[in-house]
């Protein structure tokens, strides 16, 4: 199960398992993001390189406009994956 | 435990269910289950993206013995692709200069203790081993 939702306050909430089969669904929402947003990972329990790759592409596109994604509520497992990928250097986390 | 899966991204849910059953039967922690899910996905998606030739099935095996976890993916009709020979990805740099590719193998190498590859008569076997913490 995977869900991605743009909430009324502008936060984007991700839920479930963000694997390679979910990239297309995630991209439909993230492709619309044109300014800085908070991504709430509170209910996200898994991400693989496919999900990381999509987030990277969005961050790069936003950075070109001086914008960016801020990631909040990462579980320890997700935090470790972001650290191993050194994505904690290119995303604001917390 | 061994199971055959269609070489299609839509198999990922079945693969996670298979690994989840194994994790529960063997009392593995959520952290270890997360790790084997991720490693299996990265190896499987490589097989789907780069290994497709004729066969549309892969075998995934997992077992645990004396605190060592072994996971193997067998692709019976694959193009040679040796993940152990791939140069480590460069992680430094800024968002604009950094390359996006190569993360999957980097994650696998970081999360397991050993990564082995064998290619013979069109069959590719990739095996990873992870020492479980006691």
Image (spheres, coloured by chain):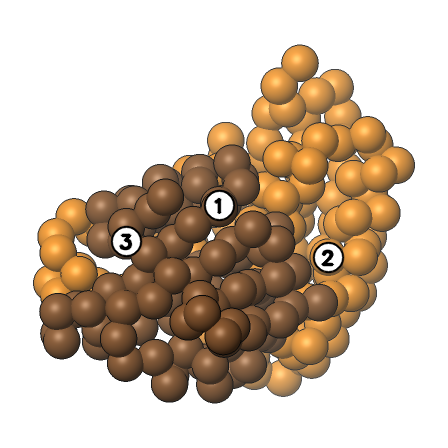
Chain colours: A brown, B orange
Q: Nearer the viewer, residue A79 or B67?
A: A79
Disc 3 chain ID: A
Above or below residue B49? Residue A45 is: above
Above or below residue B5? Residue A49 is: above
Q: Which residue is pictured at 28% across the width and 81% down the height?
A: A34
What is the residue that sits farthest to the right in this orientation? B25
Q: Which residue is mark 1?
A: A74
Q: Which residue is mark 2?
A: B16
Marks 3 and 2 belong to one chain: no
Q: Are marks 1 and 3 in contact (CB under 8 Å)?
A: no
On the image, the x and y values in percent for residue A70 come to 33, 56
2 vs 1, front mark: 1
Above or below residue B39? Residue B64 is: above
Answer left or right for B62 relative to B126.
Answer: right
Disc 2 chain ID: B
On the image, the x and y values in percent for residue B116 come to 51, 43
Above or below residue A55? Residue B6 is: below
CA distance separating discs 3 and 2: 28 Å
Q: Which mark is residue A48?
A: none
Secondary structure, mark 1, is loop
Q: Which residue is pictured at 74% across the width and 60% down the height?
A: B15
On the image, the x and y values in percent for residue A62 come to 22, 73
Q: Nearer the viewer, residue B73 or B131?
A: B131
Q: Which residue is pictured at 31% across the width and 72% down the height?
A: A58
Marks 1 and 3 belong to one chain: yes
Q: Which residue is mark 3?
A: A91
CA distance separating discs 2 and 1: 21 Å
């Amino acid at each position: 199960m995977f869900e991605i939702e743009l909430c009324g306050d502008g936060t984007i909430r991700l839920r479930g398992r963000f694997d390679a089969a979910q990239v297309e669904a995630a991209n439909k929402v993230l492709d619309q993001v044109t300014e800085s947003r908070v991504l709430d990972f509170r209910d996200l329990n898994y991400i693989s390189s496919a999900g990381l790759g999509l987030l990277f592409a969005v961050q790069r596109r936003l950075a070109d406009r001086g914008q960016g994604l801020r990631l909040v509520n990462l579980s320890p497992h997700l935090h470790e994956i972001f650290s191993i990928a050194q994505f904690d250097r290119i995303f604001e986390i917390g | 435990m061994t199971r055959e899966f269609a070489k299609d991204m839509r198999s990922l849910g079945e693969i996670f269910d298979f690994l989840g059953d194994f994790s529960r039967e063997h009392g593995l922690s959520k952290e270890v289950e997360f790790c084997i899910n991720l490693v299996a996905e990265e190896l499987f998606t490589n097989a789907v993206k780069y290994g497709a030739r004729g066969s549309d099935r892969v075998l995934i095996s997992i077992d645990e013995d004396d605190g060592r976890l072994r996971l193997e993916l067998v692709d019976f009709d694959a193009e040679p692709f040796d993940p152990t020979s791939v140069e480590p990805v460069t992680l430094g740099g800024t968002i604009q200069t950094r390359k996006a590719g190569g993360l999957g193998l980097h994650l696998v190498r970081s999360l397991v203790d050993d990564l082995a590859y064998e290619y013979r008569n069109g069959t590719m076997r990739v095996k990873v081993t992870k020492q479980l913490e006691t």
